[in-house]
Amino acid sequence: MQSFQDLLSQFELFFSRHHFPESPKTLYEPCSYLLNMGGKRVRPVLCLMSHELFEPLNDNVWNTAMAIELFHNFTLMHDDILDQAPLRRGFPTVHQKYNTATGILSGDVMNIYSYEHLNKINTQYIHAVIALFNRTAIQICEGQQLDMDYEARPYVTMEEYMKMITLKTSVLLGASMKLGALLGGATDGCSGVLYQFGQSLGLAFQLRDDYLDAFGDPHKTGKQTGGDILSNKKTFLSAKAFEMAGEKDLDKLRELLQRKDVDKINDSLHIFQSLGLKEILESEIQKYSQLAFDYLEKVPVISKRKVPLFELAQMLLKREY
Amino acid sequence: MQSFQDLLSQFELFFSRHHFPESPKTLYEPCSYLLNMGGKRVRPVLCLMSHELFEPLNDNVWNTAMAIELFHNFTLMHDDILDQAPLRRGFPTVHQKYNTATGILSGDVMNIYSYEHLNKINTQYIHAVIALFNRTAIQICEGQQLDMDYEARPYVTMEEYMKMITLKTSVLLGASMKLGALLGGATDGCSGVLYQFGQSLGLAFQLRDDYLDAFGDPHKTGKQTGGDILSNKKTFLSAKAFEMAGEKDLDKLRELLQRKDVDKINDSLHIFQSLGLKEILESEIQKYSQLAFDYLEKVPVISKRKVPLFELAQMLLKREY
């Protein structure tokens, strides 16, 4: 069993050796540019760790981990266009540095390269892997679409919000776990439980993001507090606020959506605090974290083998940036 | 052996039964909208016809034909954004009717659905089918990138132009043939020859497009003559003109690129005619058509079985619209 850090180093080495063709440079350079920005590589490493619960790493799982990270980066490239994001990880986004056409086409080809890696998987596993990969990819597109649909609305219900982040974020963590497990020969039941672990972890992870945006320490997050509030982004906090607010607060919340001044963030945070949302969100994160740990507990392998996954989950959930 | 028309009707029936999920409607309705515009369905039917040279149609080949047509439509949806095309088949393009974000995301999900169909192929064939499908998909992206790169240049060489249309258009016709053949149990040699047939047919087909734009009868094509000339699109004619022109004509050609007046088309056509390009292009189309027929001749199945493919090829190459 290897730690997250060990596997991350190995993955980075493997990933950096992977090259797109030289030409056309205008197509492939933007792909490398995005990949070279780095990233936490949580998804592929979760896949590797899940596999190691059952079997030593092999080519099948390395190729799957690679496919997952390429696919994830393809979605980032396109999402940045859809969200009109100028920066990612402190660097200009692909469509910003090059242009929108490049962002579209380089993303498309990166997606196909992820299927190139999937096609290297042994015949025994390929149907099951591609089936789960496709289902997840479709769900991610659906989640991104919901996110865009929600943008046009003043507020969304908690149910709608949870559905959106489940699709957009957490299913890929669930699938990463399940893919690693099924390639390790885990039973359907067992790989299903690991999917649930990944999905719960993903929800806790996304809610932690929402928490840090509103209540994080800007010195640690490196981001301005309340960025989501300023851009009227739908978050757990905004959904919950609309759900819980009385008449008076509702009027204020609606009014705040129209504002763009510097006090918008503080005034919103004030309502969130008065509704007790900080504590509610903390307990929600705690709930999904506990759910994740409960699922992991259920996996029928000796506890020692699960230590790296426990450690990673704790690290992700306690992160302050 | 069934004719193109027979197979087309069956494919349309099969294809129209295929439904995306209901929700999110904002994601899937644009997919159906594009598919319902229709199209010649040449690629999937070539795949079916190629398969019928060897074996009766089965689920493997139907799913492959479906994947090919979905993939092709995905590329159309994204290409229309890249080319800023307002119309396709007389209808507003997806990004025009909805918006660019929709065009990107609905295209992405349609691409994934094409892999859903590929994943239904029997284990025996799946690796070979996905390998060729991916290689072709990558080449198409590369071809589209070259097309965009060329836009920024005043002219391209014949070699560059032929490379671009080979990647952008003809490899998918080649792959459609080869996929049908290999799923029919054809030998590598035999399916390779059918790939060459499809690719040559694709080149002749694209060159016929170039021909019709400049010399076609607008009453038959339904399009204004010289649309490519007006938009400075790179075609066989423009590449060849720059290759053959003397000093004086070169100056004129460069000047024409700057013009947007009504006489631009006639003045360009005048140069093309004076360089004998109409005849050169006709003989080039004839060359690739002959090449295609020669490849088909080589396929070791009884001639009778090839009749529908011969007829389709002749129809495509003689088309006046």
Image (cartoon, coloured by chain):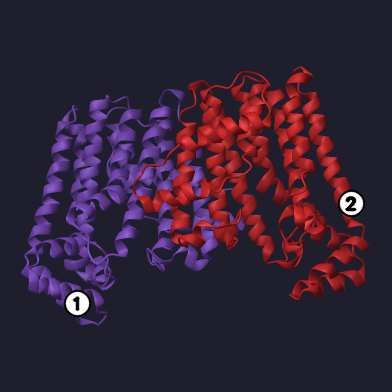
Chain colours: A purple, B red
Placement of B91 over or under A154, stated as above or below: above
Q: Is residue A64 left or right of residue B53?
A: left
Placement of B75 over or under B114, stated as above or below: below
Label 1 marks a residue whose chain is A
Residue holding disc 1: A255
Image coordinates of residue A126 in percent, x first then y, are 43, 28
Label 2 marks a residue whose chain is B
Amino acid marked by disc 2: Ile
Image coordinates of residue B245 in percent, x first then y, are 90, 64
Instruction: Please tell me if label 1 and label 2 are on a single chain.
Output: no
Tag 1's secondary structure?
helix
The local crowd at label 1, few if under 14, some if 14 to 19, many if 20 or more residues have their Cα within 10 Å, is few
Which is nearer the eye, A70 or B304?
A: B304
Question: In which quadrant will I find the C terminus of chain A?
Answer: bottom left
Residue holding disc 2: B280
Amino acid marked by disc 1: Glu
Q: Is residue B181 visible?
A: no
